[in-house]
Amino acid sequence: MEANRPPEIVWDEKAQRFETEDKEAFLQYQINDILILLAAPGEDGEQEKAKKLPAVAMDMVHTYVPRSKRGLGLAARLCDAAFAHAQRHSMLVVPTCSYISETYLPRNPAWNSLLYNGELHSSM
Ligand code: COA
């Protein structure tokens, strides 16, 4: 039924948010230019080299769901949309929001491959 359909998640590019159509629940992010260290194999048995490459990180700073709608997986749906967006646009993710780092990611570990943690990223 229409009244029971799960709320649609929409992207507001200008506000840097993923949100419900009524804008009451949202995931706020910031886009940052970063440099990542990339491990590249050395030629002819040379030692592995590291080079710096520019990249873009999506810092997911805050997730909010109104009290009356909590515990129904709405925050997880906002995160699903935001992580899929980061993947589509080849961005890394900084999980600043504690809901994302402590609850969403342990339940959705496939997204760990997108995380930027300042460590060496392999080109292999
Ligand atoms: N940090 C980590 N995990 C949290 C959390 C937080 N601050 N708040 C709630 N959770 C956990 C709950 O314990 C719950 O676990 P359970 O499934 O084992 O019961 C789970 O998140 C619920 O997941 P989900 O239904 O997807 O989340 P939600 O739609 O209820 O929304 C928040 C979760 C955090 C967005 C919501 O509680 C909220 O807006 N809180 C106030 C703002 C806030 O603290 N935001 C997070 C820091 S940026």
Image: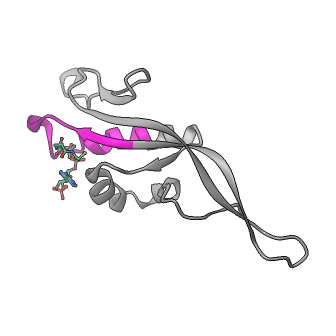
Q: Which residues are magenta?
A: 60-82
At 46% from the left and 59% from the top, the residue drawn is 112
- Residue at point 87%, 79% (across, down): 45
Q: Is residue 43 above or below residue 97?
A: below
**Residue 76 is a magenta residue:** yes
Side (left or right) of 48 relative to 113: right
| Residue 68 x, y percent position in the rendering | 8, 35
Image quadrant containing the N terminus: top left
Q: Residue 36 placed where, x, y %?
A: 61, 54
Q: Residue at x 88, y 70 (%)?
A: 43
- Residue placed furthest toward the left: 68
Which quarter of the figure is the C terminus placed in?
bottom right
- Does residue 44 appear to the left or right of 60 in the view shown? right
**Residue with the most extreme right position:** 44
Q: How many marks?
A: 0
Q: Nearer the viewer, residue 40 or 104?
A: 40
* Residue 116 falls inside the magenta stretch: no
Q: Residue at x 56, y 39 (%)?
A: 88
Give the colour scheme shown: one colour
| Image coordinates for residue 2, horizontal then vertical, percent | 23, 21
Along the line of sight, which residue is nearer the eye, 83 or 71? 83
Q: Quadrant of residue 63?
A: top left
